Structure formats: structure tokens, C-alpha cells
């Protein structure tokens, strides 16, 4: 099996590629991987250093919106695992154009190529944010999409395009919609690595609004295992929610991170104006992936978070240049 992994130099894509090539997925020992990534600000080749010399790994620097490149590359592959995206909500509020270009047009370019060349499975990595915000209960996959940010709207558009290519052109599409991920190698603009790196440096952390927004935190390893299950066993044209992590308010999460880094609330937490259109709560129902594919999260939040904080403590060389890169852009 030869798979094309888009966005494989980012946080989640690189975790998937490292795990796959180090034998972490049963039955995938002979799979070869091509990573297609344009290395935007959040794409980082060192994320793939552990597999850089692997004989079944190839890296291609390129953009998923480049029709010629994508049509050259796709024919050599049996499946596409599509992670590449603009992924940060705050950036989408400052400017949505790149989100539409990459997330919508890029996905359409890949779907066209998959259709034209008769590629096998197209696993589209989507997000729970496409459902909007939910006060109580959890979304099943059948709930209507009601995205609120330009990021989630662009992801919803690409998610629906992927499903439309299944219905119209019979492309073998499976969509996964996952909750918030955490773990090593996450770009330090997202809340957990931003807060941990600030606190390790003795700097304050910005807490949006009243801090009451609720997220379901899932370790990246659990997300990637769900993706692999859906890639191999998911039914064509179906959507699978992935989640079942730990629901926490941002205040609760902040307190845990302060405790883990030995900092106190009064000195290190700066309340800031709430994010525009800030979704209050996300929560996915994972019954479908659990009953059909046997998925359950395996990383306990307490150990996952402690390991993640330790990883950032031990890997300053990885995040310091990225933080500098992010601040130079502003
Ligand atoms: N982070 C989360 O909590 C989360 C949760 C659910 C779903 N997702 C989805 O998972 C996917 C990966 O998210 P992430 O957190 O790893 O993001 P990330 O920002 O860390 O990685 C995105 C990767 O895509 C690459 N990329 C961006 N535009 C590209 C383009 N035009 N052509 C080629 N490559 C391009 C970047 O260089 C980067 O390597 C995204 O589709 C995101 O919507 C993320």
C-alpha cells in the first residue's frame, strides 16, 4: 500500500507518519508514505526527523492547490490521508482568504485528482468544530453542520465537498471529525503549547473571556489511531466522529497547566477580551466509531498532559524558533 499524506509536516500529520513508519499500526508494516506539504508557518520538517531516513518515506515540498503537481503525484498512490489545512481559528478571524484557498480549493484539487486517477480511499480529516457549539449533550454524525468561525466554515465546506465527491463521482471518501488534540510537536500558537511554553519562560498566559468555554481534549495518538481505523475499516461515504477525551473548561485546563509548571493564577493569568464568535462547547458522540470500528481513546488525560508538559520542558530547541517565527509575523 502506498499512501499520500498531505500536511504530514504539521502536528497531527507528523504524528501519524512517525507512528505508521515506526510500526505503530498493525498490518501497515509494508506501507510506504509520501508526505506532501508546502511547509507553511506551522509545517516543520524537523517534525519528521525521526523517519527522515526511513526507506519507505518520501517528502515532497508542494502545495495541495497546485493542480499539476497534485496530478503528477496522486497516480502513484493507493490512498490519500488528507491533513493539510490552515488550522488556527484566531488566524482565520484576522484573514479568511488563505483558509478558503487551502482548505476548500486545496481539498477540491485533491478530490479531482483522486477521481481522475481512480485512487482508492480518500480519508478527509475534519473537525468537530463544523457542528458549531452545543450547550448540552453530544453531536452524532447526522447532526447538521453549523460552523461559526471562518476556519470551521472552510473545514465544513471541504468536508461536504469530500462527501459530495463520494455521492457524485463514487470517490471512496471517509470523513473523520475529531475534537481538540494535544500532544508533542503542536505548534506553540495553540492553547496548550502556548500556555506551557509561556509558563516555562515565566511569562503570563492570556485567558479568553470568562474562561468557561468547554473543549474535549484528546491525545493526538488517539486521534491518529481513529484515523487509521477509519482508513482501513470505515464504510465508504460515511462520517466518523473521533473524541471521547476529557471535557474541560479553559479555566480548568489553565489551572492544570499552572500546577504542572509550578506557577500561580494571580501572577500568571491575564484575562483578555473573548475571541469573536467563540464557540461555547464542543462535544462529539463517538458511538459509531466505537461500535463499528472498535475505537476507544487509550491515553488517560492526566498522564497524556503530564507527558506533554515534560516534552515541551525537554524540547526547547524545537519550540523556541517556532515561537520566534510566529511573533515575527505579527
Ligand atoms: N489540532 C486539532 O486539535 C485538530 C482537531 C481536529 C481536526 N484537525 C484537523 O487536522 C488537520 C491537521 O491539523 P494540525 O493541528 O496538525 O495542523 P498544523 O497547522 O499543525 O498542520 C497543517 C500542515 O498542513 C500544511 N499545509 C498547510 N497548507 C498547505 C497547502 N496549501 N499545501 C500543502 N500543505 C499545506 C502545513 O505546512 C502543516 O504542515 C487539519 O485538517 C485540521 O483541520 C485538527
Image (tube, rainbow, N blue to C red):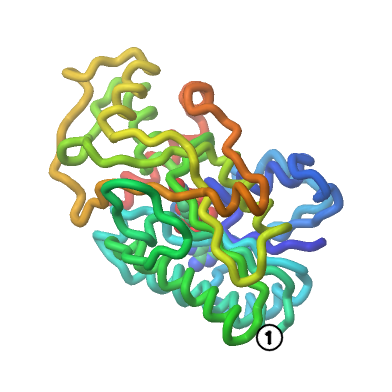
Q: Is residue 162 above or below residue 176?
A: below
Left or right placement of residue 266 versus residue 37 in this view = left
Does the Cβ of the disc 1 residue fall within 8 Å of ligand 1? no
Camera sees residue 102 = yes
Which residue is located at x 80 percent, y 44 percent? 26
Q: Which element is circle 1 on?
A: helix
- Residue nearest the observer in this picture, 59 or 227: 227
The total number of labels drawn is 1
Q: Nearer the viewer, residue 138 or 205?
A: 138
Q: Decide which of 301, 154 is in the foreground and name it.
A: 301
Task: Identify the residue shown where x is 77% and y is 69%.
Answer: 78
Q: Which residue is mark 1?
A: 116
Quadrant housing residue 269:
top left
Q: Residue furthest top?
A: 262
Judge left or right: residue 25 versus residue 214. Answer: right
Q: Quadrant of residue 220?
A: top right
User: Can you give x and y, in whole percent of width and height, for residue 48 in the image?
Assistant: 64, 45
Residue 69 drawn above or below residue 265: below
Residue 20 lies, in percent from the top left, at 73, 46
The image position of residue 190, as x and y in percent, is: 38, 42
Crowding near the residue tagged with mark 1, few <14, some 14–19, many ≥20 C-alpha atoms within 10 Å = some
Measured as percent of width and height from the top left, residue 2 is found at 79, 63
Amino acid at each position: 500500500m502506498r499512501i499520500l499524506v498531505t500536511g504530514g509536516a504539521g502536528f497531527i500529520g507528523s504524528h501519524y507518519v512517525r507512528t505508521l513508519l515506526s510500526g505503530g499500526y498493525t498490518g501497515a508494516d509494508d506501507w510506504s508514505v509520501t508526505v506532501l506539504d508546502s511547509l507553511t508557518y506551522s509545517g516543520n520538517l524537523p517534525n519528521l526527523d525521526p523517519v527522515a531516513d526511513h526507506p519507505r518515506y518520501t517528502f515532497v515540498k508542494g502545495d495541495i492547490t497546485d493542480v499539476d503537481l497534485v496530478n503528477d503525484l496522486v497516480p502513484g498512490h493507493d490512498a490519500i490521508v488528507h491533513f493539510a489545512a490552515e488550522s488556527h481559528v484566531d488566524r482565520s478571524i484576522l484573514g479568511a482568504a488563505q483558509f478558503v484557498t487551502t482548505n476548500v480549493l486545496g481539498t477540491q484539487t485533491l478530490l479531482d485528482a483522486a477521481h481522475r486517477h481512480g485512487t482508492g480511499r480518500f480519508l478527509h480529516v475534519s473537525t468537530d468544530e463544523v457542528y458549531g457549539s452545543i450547550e448540552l449533550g453530544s453531536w452524532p454524525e447526522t447532526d447538521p453542520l453549523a460552523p461559526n468561525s471562518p476556519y470551521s466554515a472552510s473545514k465544513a465546506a471541504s468536508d461536504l465537498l469530500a462527501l459530495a465527491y463520494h455521492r457524485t463521482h463514487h470517490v471512496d471518501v471517509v470523513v473523520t471529525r475529531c475534537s481538540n488534540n494535544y500532544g508533542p510537536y503542536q505548534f506553540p500558537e495553540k492553547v496548550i503549547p502556548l500556555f506551557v511554553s509561556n509558563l516555562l519562560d515565566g511569562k503570563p498566559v492570556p485567558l479568553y473571556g470568562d474562561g468557561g468555554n468547554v473543549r474535549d481534549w484528546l491525545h493526538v495518538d488517539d486521534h491518529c489511531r481513529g484515523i487509521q481505523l477509519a482508513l482501513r475499516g470505515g464504510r465508504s461515504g460515511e462520517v466518523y466522529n473521533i473524541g471521547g477525551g476529557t471535557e474541560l473548561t479553559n479555566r480548568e485546563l489553565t489551572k492544570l497547566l499552572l500546577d504542572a509548571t509550578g506557577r500561580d493564577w494571580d501572577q500568571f493569568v491575564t484575562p483578555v477580551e473573548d475571541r469573536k464568535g467563540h464557540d461555547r462547547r464542543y462535544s462529539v458522540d463517538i458511538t459509531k466509531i466505537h461500535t463499528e470500528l472498535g475505537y476507544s481513546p487509550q491515553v488517560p488525560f492526566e498522564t497524556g498532559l503530564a507527558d506533554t508538559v515534560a516534552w515541551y520542558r525537554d524540547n526547547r530547541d524545537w519550540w523556541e524558533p517556532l515561537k520566534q517565527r510566529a511573533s515575527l509575523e505579527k
